[in-house]
Amino acid sequence: MQNPGSSNPALDLAFDHVQHTGRHLFLTGKAGTGKTTFLRSLRERLPKQMVVVAPTGVAAINAGGVTLHSFFQLPFGPLAGRENEQERFRFSRDKIAMIRGMDLLVIDEISMVRADLLDAVDGVLRRYRDRRKPFGGVQLLMIGDLQQLSPVVKDNERELLRGLYDTPYFFGSRALRETDYACIELTRVYRQQDGRFLELLNQVRENRLSPEALAELNRRHVPDFSPADGDGYVTLCTHNAQAQRLNDAKLAALPGSAVRFAADVAGDFPESSFPVDPQIELKIGAQVMFVKNDPSPDKRFYNGKIGRITAFDGASVRVRCPGDPADIVAAPMQWNNVQYAIDPATNRIAETVEGTFQQIPLKLAWAITIHKSQGLTFERAIVEADASFAHGQVYVALSRCKTLEGLVLRTPLRPDSIIVDPAVADFTRQMAARHPDPGRLRMDRLTYQRELLVNLFSFHLLRYRLNALLELADLNRGSLLPGLVERFGQLHDVAQTGLVSVGEKFLLQVDRLLADHPDAETNPALRDRLQKASGYFEDKLLNGILDPLADADCEPDNQTLRRQLLNAREKAETEARIKLAGLQACADGFRVQAFLAARSAAALRQHPSPRAKNSRRKGKIPAAVPANSAAPVNPVLFEALRAWRAEQAGAQKIPAYCVLSQKALHAIAAAAPKDLPELATLHGIGPKKLAQYGEALLALIQRHA
């Protein structure tokens, strides 16, 4: 298959759209138009932080990504109406950071993704990013061909989905319909070069097959066709059982004993994601198909190339393909099961190999199901599609073949065998209106720049995070140290008056400057304003938000409340850090790529857990004491008292608050009593506690007061 290069305007437009805009994109095209090659190129060239997912394990392995369900921790089955249940799925800190840090979500084989699954992804992204924006503000790249694989909807699920969606296809998603997504269709076919054959395939694809075209295709019907050994024909059939029976019969008819090749599976590689059978039995003379591309510069084989086994050589197999001057040595090759993780050295989302699957890249190929032929190319094919039962099956089968002359129909095609979903046909007709021509691309690029600036100087989410922290603290005021609620109230006021209000006024200036010069990256007046504004907002974030948050003692005795406070504080800190990184990236002018890199790095940077961070806090005031307080807290004494309490609790094997409450420690650190009678006047120090711990407490006070 010819490699689609930069000479393809549609591919160039798609790449520019993904790189320079934030608009969602559905990239589609007939079989053989280069969608898989585009995804591979995107990985190598795109500077955005991207995550690649697919609806099935095999599709994810082929795309070099992970499954939708695993990355977003979604249950199987219908997801509509299960929003509250999804809230119970707990995400790790790293997974949340990746969700916050990614710029682009690529969904391969989008035709198999149901509307309710895409809406569930939207729910997760909104939960951890921006609830006001579809998909949390993450850009989507959806790749697939609606004329091929369809979403699976079981009979018991169909009625439920029908009541919520017009169609189960991804474009029925409520979240996607809130967006103005673009559609680009790749039309240059690299698999077929025969213009007449392409026209016939298009008629099948679009369900407009004329009687004359049907008759022309049916001239490829050859009753009782029996190809000679070595011709390299592959039979494409609708059901697994048909393919299995034919392959087993052909293999049994060959002389000699079969040789078994067992896969070597290491680490975590789910059986459902195995790219080929873990146990393969072969004989000399067997017709086989390569199931992986040759990674060497020679490119001697590709996924779908047909040949016959000529010899076995230890763990390798020698295969002769029609037209080749010599055998190809097929040695075991490796497939990787990847997961996404944060690389602490680069603060980028990186693929990590969780498991490997090694096997010879071959499978028996006298027959294969139409479903499993997806993405393959054959020189010669025998099609059994009279039992077609799903949308697009006939088109997939016919389009696997490079030429009309290489196609043989086992049975004639009937008009009712060509099944096309009306919803897909309607959507396909509407796609042209969403095509982004170069003029629209320029508008989208400028719109994207403005959206990034609006996001940077909009501090509503930070205020929301701080308000959630304040409300939680106020609700549990009696369990917290004195002054903590007041401190959080001050932070909320700083966010409102010093950030939200000022940010809204600054954005008005931004809009006036962009009206005169719309390109934010080359606007000199905007660059000057950004340089001046960055210093102001940085100071507010550092001294007004981040430093006071770090100093606030969020560790009450109640463990549940402690966890809630630490999590709420961490969300506020993360949002403030991301804002700070974006502002610092704009100090010398606005550049989209530099801005995205800084923002993502801040979201992905691995910080110590809130618990670990607090455990290392030394000498910091545990809570903001009101200005009229006559007894400021001695931070050194407070930390010494807390360490002593932990030691006592460990020795007695009791919770720390059973020794003394944190409020009692706070009162002691503020009053620094000099004798037992003075100590006895403090809240939380009753006669029993005084007798048990009084002398030890006084000794601590003398050492640290």
Image (cartoon, rainbow, N blue to C red):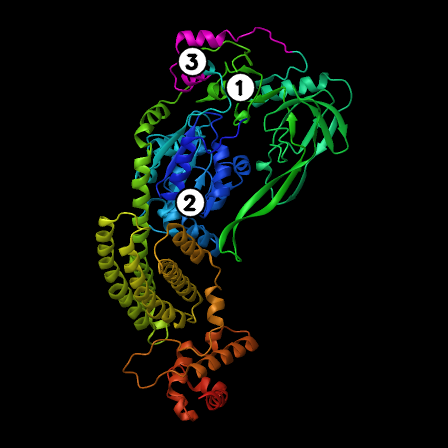
Return the residue at label 3.
416
Q: Gap between marks 2 and 1, in whole Å?
A: 34 Å
Q: Which of the two discs, 2 and 3, labels the residue nearer the N terminus?
A: 2
Label 1 sits on residue: 402
- On screen, residue 12 versus residue 298, left or right, reads left
User: Is residue 16 located in the magenta-colored stretch of the structure?
Assistant: no
- Mark 3–mark 1 Cα distance, whole angstroms, equals 25 Å
Up the image or down, 414 lies above or below 542; here it is above
* Between marks 2 and 1 in the image, the one whose residue lies nearer the viewer: 1
| Depth check, front residue: 616 or 270 | 616
Residue 481 percent location from the top left of the image: 37, 75
| The disc label shown at residue 168, or none | none
Q: Classify residue 112 by image quadrant.
A: top left
Which residues lie in the magenta part? 198-227
* Inter-mark Cα distance, 2 to 3: 41 Å
Q: Give the amino acid type for the residue marked by disc 1 in the picture.
A: Lys
Q: Indicate the amino acid at tag 3.
A: Asp
Give the residue type that dot 2 points to. Answer: Leu
Secondary structure state at the residue bearing disc 1 = loop
For the point 29% across and 55% down, the residue is 524
Neighbour tally class for label 1: few under 14, some 14-19, many 20 plus, Cα within 10 Å: many
For disc 3, the neighbor class at 10 Å (few under 14, some 14 to 19, many from 20) is few
| Residue 48 drawn at (x, y percent) | 44, 47
Label 2, on which residue?
Answer: 104
Residue 73 in view of the camera: no
